[in-house]
Amino acid sequence: MHIVIMGCGRVGSTLAHILEDNGHSVAIIDRDPQAFRRLRAGFRGRRVTGIGFDRDVLTEAGIESAAAYVAVSSGDNSNIISARVARETFGVDNVVARIYDPRRAEVYQRLGIPTVATVRWTADQILRRILPEGAEPLWRDPSGTVILAEVTVQSGWIGTRVVDLEQRAGVRGAFINRMGEALVIADDTVVQEGDVLHVIAAENDMDRINKVLAVAPEEDH
C-alpha cells in the first residue's frame, strides 16, 4: 500500500525505510530539502518539498491513493493540522500524528486523530529502567488516564481463579507472565506462584487495586 509521511527527521526517515523494506510505496514530505539527506541512497520513494498540510503538496505525494498518513514533523500544530487535512479533505482513515505536549493528546483524540506523545513515551521508558519493577506503567494511553501495569499479588491469592480476583479487586486482567511467557487469561486460569499479573486500569485507581491485591483474600474483610 501507499503511505505518505510528513517530516523527514530521524523518525520519519526510519519509518520510510522500514515501510519500503516491507514492500510498501512511500512518499515523504519535508519543507527543508536538506532533510532528505537522511534517506539512504537507494530509497525509491517520492521526496516532496513543501508544507505537509498544503493540498497541492499532499496531492503530489499521492495522498489520493494513500492507505495511511503519518505526521512526524517537529511541530505539534503542523502535525495535527496536516493529519486533519489528510483525513477530512482526502478521506484517509488511517492517520497518526506525533505530539510533544501530551496535554494536547486528549483534545486530538476527540478530533479522531490517534497520537503518539513522544516525550511522555520516552520518559516512561526511562523511568521503567531506573525505578523498581512495576513502579511505572508498561503502557499509557495518549490522554494519560488508562494504563497497562504490573501488579504484585499477595501469595494468599495463589490458587484463586483470575476471574474471581478481577471481580474482587474491581479490575480487568490483561495477561499473566508465567515463567517468562505471556499467558492469555481464560475462565479457568488460576494464579500460580511466581505469576506476574498485568492489568488494564484507570491510573487514578491503581492505589486502590494494589492495596486490595496486597492482602490475602481471606484476610480482606
Image (cartoon, rainbow, N blue to C red):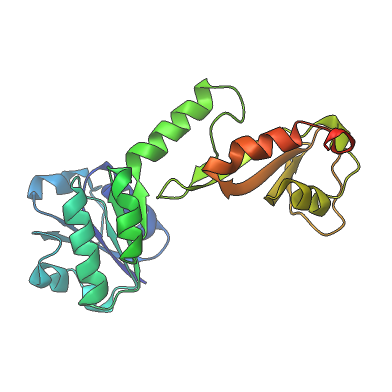
Residue that appears at 29% across and 73% down: 66
Q: Quadrant of residue 213?
A: top right
On the image, the x and y values in percent for residue 93 come to: 35, 73
86 or 197: nearer the viewer = 197
On the image, the x and y values in percent for residue 17 come to: 33, 52
103 or 33: nearer the viewer = 103
Res 180 seen here: no
Q: Is residue 98 above or below residue 129?
A: below
Q: Quadrant of the N terminus?
A: bottom left
Residue that appears at 18% across and 61% down: 81
Q: Residue furthest front?
A: 221
Residue that appears at 78% across and 48% down: 168
Q: Quadrant of the C terminus?
A: top right
Residue that appears at 27% across and 72% down: 87
Res 177 seen here: yes
Left or right for 7, reference 183: left
Total labels: the figure holds 0
Left or right for 61, reference 209: left
41 or 4: nearer the viewer = 4
Left or right for 193, reference 38: right
On the image, the x and y values in percent for residue 167 come to: 76, 53
On the image, the x and y values in percent for residue 23 come to: 40, 64
